[in-house]
Amino acid sequence: MSGQWRLILALAASLVVAVFAVINVDPVQVDYLFGTAEWPLILIIIGSALLGGLMIGSVGMWRIYRLQQEIKQLRHKAEHHEQSSTDTPSPSTGLKRQEAGQETEQKDEPKA
């Protein structure tokens, strides 16, 4: 359900930006490091919104990549830990085996 609400909010925000951009079509002067130019304000607004979206999206993708790497490392550690724990019996497992062996010896002895 959360994904649907995010989509609805993203579409609503896009609609607001589009309406705002269409209303403002007058040319404006843009100053660059190497000069100036006149651009329609609609292009500046839409370009700024697209660049902002790309920046947010790239940060989100970077976080997802880092989380996937962390998951991969944790799975590898868990597999290694699981493998090492099955190779060497724990002290409690050894005690249980000894107790089980003593019980079978007691059952085999004849009662006097």
Image (tube, rainbow, N blue to C red):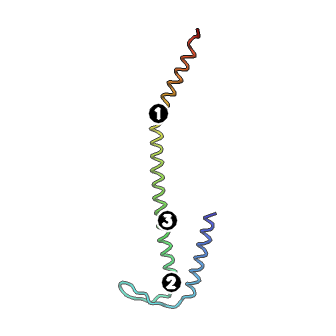
Disc with the residue nearer the chain's start (1 vs 2): 2
Q: Which residue bears the numbered disc 2?
A: 43
Rendered view: 106 above or below 18: above
Instruction: Identify the residue at image location x=50%, y=87%.
Output: 41
- Image quadrant in which you'd find residue 66: bottom left
Rendered view: 101 above or below 65: above
Instruction: Identify the residue at image location x=48%, y=48%.
Output: 75
Q: Residue type at mark 2? A: Leu
Disc with the residue nearer the chain's start (2 vs 3): 2
Q: Residue type at mark 1? A: Ser
Q: Which residue bears the numbered disc 3?
A: 60
Q: Secondary structure at mark 2?
A: helix
Q: Which label lies toward us, 3 or 1?
A: 1
- Residue 80, position in %: x, y? 45, 42
Q: Which residue bears the numbered disc 1?
A: 90
Instruction: Identify the residue at image location x=63%, y=66%.
Output: 4
Disc with the residue nearer the chain's start (3 vs 1): 3
Question: Residue 104's mark?
Answer: none
Q: Residue type at mark 3? A: Gly
Residue in front for this viewpoint, 41 or 1: 1
